[in-house]
Amino acid sequence: MKWVLVFLLAFLFFFLIDRLAIYLTDIFLAGSFGYTWLSIHHILQIFLAVAIMALPWWHRSLSDWGFNLKHSDQTLQILLRFSIGWILFSTLYIVVTEWLSGWPPLLGFPLTAENILIYLLFESILVGISEEIVFRGLVYGTLSPYFSRKVKIGFSINYAGIISALFFAVAHIGFQFFPFAITAFAPMQIFMAFALGLFYAVLREKTGSLLGPILAHNISDGWLSILYIIIQSITAGQS
């Protein structure tokens, strides 16, 4: 039954960190520009996750949780191939879906210099650091001693990686408790979060470092944010 308790503990870690960060951010920034709010929310998530990982009862160093530069050369080689594939795939997918949908707005805020800067800093730097520390750092690190068995699903990955990817996908579903309601559910986004989460977990497992997952995450989100800005700028200029 210990593995059940570890599974629940890992789930509670990411869930409660998110809820506590939301509560603390709302105290100071409720009603502010969305990406300013999100930036502070993710910074708080980093501090909360690292604080949990630094607790002495784990008997682990932060390096054991992935805060190291192991196998950096291998990581960069993998990221180069990933970046080329991701840019080609995501650009084709977004352009085709936008064209078929009649070019609806991709961003819900004015493209001022300040808004663009905050948006790009969040998507290209902060989001990958925060979410990978939580999911491939804390969650994966909590699960891995008890879910280390590997499975082949076209590639080799352990169950800790699959579960962390599943939790990562669940985190992209919006909901409220009182009364309970699903407030955001985008099937394609959830599927892509799970697929990318598997890739980030494989990187974490192969290298023993969070460097690869963080960079890959920021590349994937950063390129999409640049693409959204380009498309919205062009379509706004034509309207």
Image (cartoon, helix red, strand yellow):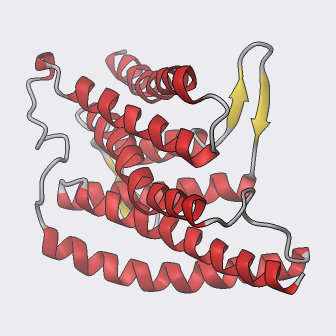
Q: Is residue 78 above or below residue 127?
A: below
Q: Is residue 215 above or below residue 42?
A: below
For image coordinates 51% across by 74% down, the residue present is 223
Q: Position of residue 1 (x, y in %)?
A: 37, 15
For image coordinates 76% across by 13% down, the residue present is 178
The quadrant in which residue 149 appears is top left
Q: How many marks?
A: 0
Q: Position of residue 89 (x, y in %)?
A: 59, 82
Q: Position of residue 171 (x, y in %)?
A: 57, 39
Q: Nearer the viewer, residue 119 or 67?
A: 119
Answer with left or right where residue 190 lies relative to residue 238. Answer: left
Answer with left or right where residue 136 lies relative to residue 188. Answer: left
Q: Quadrant of the C terminus?
A: bottom right
Q: Position of residue 128 (x, y in %)?
A: 40, 54
Q: Residue furthest front?
A: 113
Answer with left or right where residue 58 lies relative to residue 3. Answer: left
**Residue 145 visible here:** yes
**Residue 159 visible here:** no
Q: Nearer the viewer, residue 193 or 145?
A: 193
The quadrant in which residue 102 appears is bottom right
Q: Nearer the viewer, residue 24 or 94?
A: 24
For image coordinates 55% across by 60% down, the residue present is 114
